[in-house]
Image (cartoon, rainbow, N blue to C red):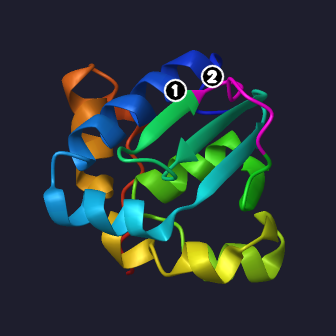
Amino acid sequence: MPYFDDVQVFYDLLVGTFDDLMKDDAIRQKALDSNLLVKFVYRNPVGEFWIDCRGDEVKVFPGQLPDDASPDATLSMELDTAHAFWCGQLNLLGALSSGEIEADGSVPKLLKMLPVIKPAYAIYTGLLESKGLDDLIIEEEEED
């Protein structure tokens, strides 16, 4: 059973995560310096999420982008895979290698942003807690 029945709940979490993340000047500047337009395509439930770093502020668009721009990079995955990533419990390179995440475009450029967004994991899980969605937090499994 998927973590989310309604993609809008996930969208709200991501918008909140990026709103908070972009309050950090260094992170915001690094994102803007990338000048990337990134599209995320989700399955089960279906949705898409855009991050636009092309202007003087980082903008996010849950659902469709309002213009016909082509993304620099597109990442396609199950929504549960995206959720695991934002919980800090998914190795992005491993998921790309295994095909769990399919990628097109400027993926190397996008991967350079990975260390910059690590603070988003705590923001995302904090939002889950504050919204009473603690049961959706994926935590690292302890080894016996």
Looking at the image, is 124 positioned above or below residue 100? above
Toward which corner of the image does residue 73 lie, by quadrant?
Answer: bottom right
Q: Is residue 113 magenta?
A: no
Please tell me the numbered disc located at residue 11. Answer: 1
Please tell me the numbered disc located at residue 7. Answer: 2
For badge 2, the amino acid type reads: Val
Magenta-highlighted residues: 62-69
Q: Is residue 64 magenta?
A: yes
Q: Is residue 118 visible?
A: no
The CA distance from mark 2 to mark 1 is 6 Å
For badge 1, the amino acid type reads: Tyr
Return the x and y of residue 50 as percentages of the image width and height.
61, 40
- Give the residue displayed 58% in from the left and 72% down from the top: 110
- Give the residue displayed 45% in from the left and 47% down from the top: 55
Return the x and y of residue 98 as percentages of the image width and height.
80, 78
Tell me, yes or no, whether the two marked residues, 2 and 1, touch with CB atoms within 8 Å.
Answer: yes
Magenta-drawn stretch, dominant element (helix, strand or loop): loop
